[in-house]
Amino acid sequence: MAAQAEEPPAQSQLKAGTLTPVMPAPELKLDGSDGKPLSLANYRGKVVLLAFGFSNCGEVCPVTLFTLASARRKLGDEAAGVQVVYVTVDPQRDDAAQMRKFLGSFDATFVGGVGTMAQIEAAEKSYGISVSRKVYADGSYTIGHSSSIYIIDRAGGLRAVMPYGHPVDDFVHDLKILLRG
Amino acid sequence: MSRVVRLILLVVLAVLAAAVGWAGFAPIHAETREQAFDIPRGTWARRRAGDLVEILPDHIRLTLGIKDVLLIRNHDDVPQTFGPTIMMPGQSFRLPFERAASYQFVCSAHASGQLTIEVEPEPVMPWAKIHWRVREWWENRKK
């Protein structure tokens, strides 16, 4: 993996955790909830907010998606330069249609990532995502998963990681820097 | 009590009062707000060989306004997962904190795989500053 510049300008101003040197974000080989192949290369020129979750998530994912949708709204016209990509950790239940419906309830521009178990596991591994499944007596299950948001700059570099729980304004702050940088 | 003894006591009390006053009211300066930890080369190999090498403590304490940025540098030959991200060999991760809280992170560089970061509020009141300074002095003294 080739590294970009040692430390891009404004890296230390970000409220998210930052990675130095910046390296290319691991590519995704998935299907998009929009019916097209999902590749981060499709979004060069935009800042990508990448997160992992699932549509049956009752706690973490709705908060994350609401936060990201609110940040886009606050950005106004600048939001056109931001793409949210949400990759499922539950390929058994989340297909393209399910993810489209789930994500669409937060923001119609969000794109979901779906695929086979092997494809999803490969994506999880490349981003260091931990996933654990808890099965209930009735056979139903829920999934615990890493809940950080990966911030990929317009050149495709994995610049920063925002841990779960940061407020909307922190995202707006960092996105403005990356969109103008 | 002789006059000399009283004078010595007075001086000792004055010095103590000055020290407490300084500790309670002087601003706390830190050379850097980063608390840095290095994952040395060979950590993964040593752990794979069964060596329970400890690189990071179980518990890291940070203080807002003084030491509130965690810096982890991965010098190992393999990627290491720290909390919210994966760090490639040669990469560092700088994580600033702005809210006092207890944070639990997954960390592959740690034998237990778990790391707690306690972020304390900035010591503003005199007693809090004295407490912070005394604790820092005591902990640095042990090192």
Image (spheres, coloured by chain):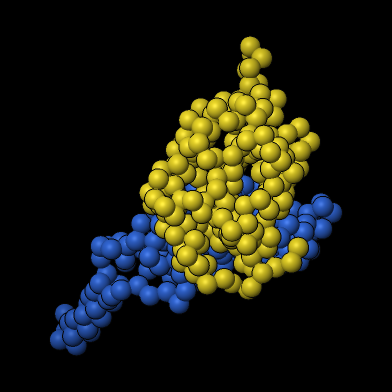
Kindly tell me whether residue A61 is visible in this rendering.
yes
Report the residue that reaches farthest toward the right.
B49
In the image, taking residue A166 as reference, residue B6 lies left or right, namely left
Quarter of the image for the N terminus of chain B: give it: bottom left
Q: Quadrant of the C terminus of chain B?
A: bottom right
Q: Nearer the viewer, residue B95 or B53?
A: B95
Residue B55: percent from left, percent from top? 66, 60
Q: Nearer the viewer, residue A174 or B23?
A: A174
Horizontal side, residue A125 vs residue B45: left or right: left
Q: Nearer the viewer, residue A21 or A77?
A: A77
The image position of residue B44, as x and y in percent, is: 78, 57
Tally of numbered tags: 0
Q: Colour of chain B?
A: blue
Is A83 placed left or right of B29 in the picture? right
Which residue is at a point 59% across and 43% down the rendered structure image? A85
In the rendered image of this protein, does residue B43 appear above or below residue A58?
below
Name the residue: 69% across, 47% down. A39
Q: Residue furthest top?
A: A138
> Residue at 28% across / 75% down in the picture?
B26
Residue B142 shows in this picture: no
x and y percentages locating residue B128 in the rendered image? 30, 61
Q: Quadrant of residue A161?
A: bottom right
Chain A visual colour = yellow
**Relative to A58, residue A36 above or below:** below
Q: Is residue B137 left or right of residue A113?
A: left
Could you say where residue A60 lies in the image, as x and y percent from the top left? 51, 35
Q: Tell me which residue sits at (49%, 48%) in the image.
A: B103
